[in-house]
Image (spheres, grey):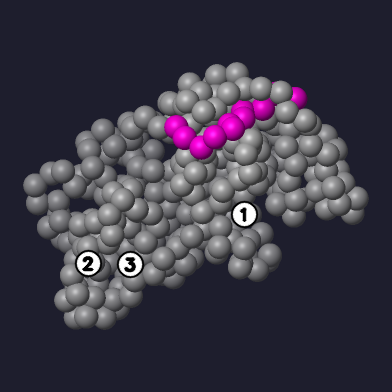
Amino acid sequence: MRAALYSRFGDPATVLDTAQAPQPVPGPGEVRIRTVLAPIHNHDLLTIRGLYGYKPTLPAIGGSEALGTVDAVGEGVAHVQPGQRVVAASVHGTWAEAFVAPARMVIPMPDGIADETAAQLVAMPLSALMLLEFLQARPGQWIVQNTANGAVGKSLAMLATARGIKVANLVRSEDAAAQLRALGIEHVFVTASDGWKAQVQATLGEGLAAAAVDSIGGDASGDLVELLGHHGTLVSFGVMSGQPMHIPAGGLIYKEATVKGFWGSKVSTAMAVEDKRRLVGELLQRAASGELRLPVDAVFPLDQVAEAAAAAQRGGRDGKVLLRV
């Protein structure tokens, strides 16, 4: 079968190539999925660079999420059947004509959800929904997040709003702010503008935010602490700056604030099956109703995986880059 392979870690636009690979055979409790569309996520690119928490044995096939059709099932699999339209996430090797996934990770996809939405419906939106539950914010409370124009940030803003939770969305540029507003996302603030912090504080009101999500690190972490209310929680979700979190001690002490880390794969592993089914059901409902919108910037054929990886690494995208197999 054709697959997007890499034999060394490095720049995905350089080390990825389309080549032949053995077609996988599903074992007990597994299914083989014939790929239709697969997204390129930031963690996929970090994995190819050798910088993620998971490091595959080389050579490896890229990708961790895809939409496709079941074409073979292993022993003991009963809840999905060949020919069924499904998605799978938190798996490996999806940038190929076929991949194998544990049957428990496979989600049947309703026909009413478009391919471009279904292909990216689980990994980032589910992380956003798990993060929202992790924050324990209640309807009417405020959350503040930076890098709100990222895939998780957009999903968090839409899903929180659907639950009645208010979100202050911080971005670095007017172009990024325009992207969010085009999706119907409100309360967008540009951190490159003068007086942005005072504007956010005025919007939050006297109680400020119950929780904040930091995907940058460095001085941005301290900015978020200033926007937290008493007993607020700051959650570290990423470190785009590559710098340690710079947090004034006084901000933590006098607000009695809490700082936590969030890694979606760990939270997902520890989550009860019933809770995960509930969250996936909510995602399907929000996507079908239009409350959750997942824009696409570009779709590339698998044979152009290097070009697709380069596009996925460019700033200013309007949505996700997908691979069509």
Q: Is residue 5 magenta?
A: yes
Q: State the image coordinates of residue 129 (x, y, percent, origin top left).
A: 50, 57
Question: First in sequence: mark 3 or mark 2?
Answer: 3
Q: Does any portion of residue 215 appear in the rendered image?
A: yes
Mark closer to the observer (3, 1)? 3
Question: First in sequence: mark 3 or mark 1?
Answer: 3
Q: State the image coordinates of residue 35 (x, y, percent, origin top left).
A: 70, 31
Say which residue appears at 56% left-offset and 57% top-offset: 265
Q: Is residue 29 magenta?
A: no
Q: What's the residue type where badge 2 is placed?
A: Ile
User: In the current view of this chain or complex, which residue is farthest to the right?
Assistant: 75
Q: Are marks 1 and 2 in contact (CB under 8 Å)?
A: no
Q: Which residue is mark 2?
A: 247
Q: What's the residue type where badge 1 is placed?
A: Val
User: Relative to residue 57, is residue 294 drawn left or right?
Assistant: left
* Camera-nearest residue between 152 and 217: 217
| Distance CA(mark 3)–CA(mark 2) | 10 Å
Q: Are marks 3 and 2 in contact (CB under 8 Å)?
A: yes
Disc 1 element:
helix
